[in-house]
Amino acid sequence: MKAKKLVVLTLLAILVLATFACGDGGEEETPTPTPSPAQGNIAFASDRDGDDEIYVMDADGSNQTNLTNNPARDMFPSWSPDGSRMAFCSNRDGDWEIYVMDAGGSNQTNLTNNPAADSYPSWSPDGSKIAFVSYRDDNEEIYVMDADGSNQTNLTNNPTADSHPAWSPDGSKIAFASGRDGNTEIYVMDADGSNLTRVTNNPAWDSRPSWSADGSMITFDSGRDGNAEIYVMDADGFNQTRLTNNPAWDWLPSWSQDGGKIAFTSDRDGNSEIYVMDADGSNLTWLTNNPADDEWPSWSP
């Protein structure tokens, strides 16, 4: 009996030693991955020169440069997919129009030239088209045009406001915000305006969608927590998750082209500033830190 007990104890000792030798004893922890640095450039609108202008900065907040330098208001920047040009909105001709310029600010050209307000441009992934919002039908509608301003076409044609278009990375779909169901929700449609699908359904407003680089997710801002917060969801509307949680307003998200970061606007420091965070909401970083209002970030390719 003693011999049998000794054999059992010996076997247990061997098993314990083997467990530690294989690294399963819990003494070694898996290293925490270091977040990758932000890449590319971020365009944004700022009124630091007395009126709204389009600026650009490195993704870490350095080298902030005024691109438009016009006494009128210039807002809502959107990069072309190759990073060589930028669409934006300006009221320099007496009403809001869509303009395009080279990435350095040269060759600023009016594309829309309509008496009604045109705003919120979003470039298609192949660079051939620009979606935008127009008030030319007495309410906000989503339009699309060729990148040279030709062939302007109404996609939504609804009596309520449709706004803030965002093109999916594969070019097949456009996400946008609409009040057609009694409050503002996120919708997705095919790029020709067909196959409309509502992807949020909340009593509060949901707006300003931005696609992840692989097209699998959409970030947006929402008023469902009593103030504006940044959320993320699967592209079909499932798994809606809040990323920010602050008493101030967090809104206007823009996903980085590598999918790892989200830039957004927040007034948590007393005025609107540009912030960036990892795509899961961690590692929040303040980028602009200016007494003026900085908003509407747009991440370059």
Image (cartoon, helix red, strand yellow):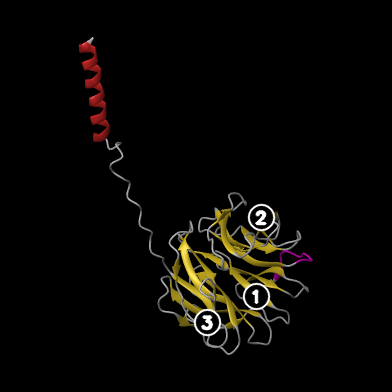
Which residues lie in the magenta part?
A: 153-160
Residue at point 50%, 59% (across, down): 213
Q: Residues within 10 Å of mark 1 (few under 14, many from 20)?
A: many
Choose the circle earlier in sequence order: 3 or 1: 1
Dot 1 lies on which element?
strand
Residue on which the image places disc 1: 119
3D distance between C-alphas at marks 3 and 1: 22 Å
Q: How many marks?
A: 3
Residue 12: where, in percent of width, then height?
26, 23
In this image, 158 relative to 81: left or right? Answer: right
Instruction: Looking at the picture, tell me which residue is in the foreground, 27 or 195.
Output: 27
Residue on which the image places disc 3: 292
Residue on which the image places disc 2: 200
Which corner quadrant of the image does residue 283 belong to?
Answer: bottom left
Q: Is residue 156 magenta?
A: yes
Instruction: Looking at the picture, tell me which residue is in the foreground, 257 or 24.
Output: 24
Q: Is residue 34 visible to us here?
A: yes
Residue 95: where, in percent of width, then height?
69, 84
Query: Which one is in front in this view, the residue at disc 3 or the one at disc 1?
Result: 3
Magenta region's main secondary structure? loop
In this image, 116 relative to 253: left or right? Answer: right
Q: Residues within 10 Å of mark 3 (few under 14, many from 20)?
A: some
| Residue farthest toward the bottom in the current orientation of the protein | 71
Circle 3: residue type: Ala
Can you say whether 29 is above or below 164 in the image? above
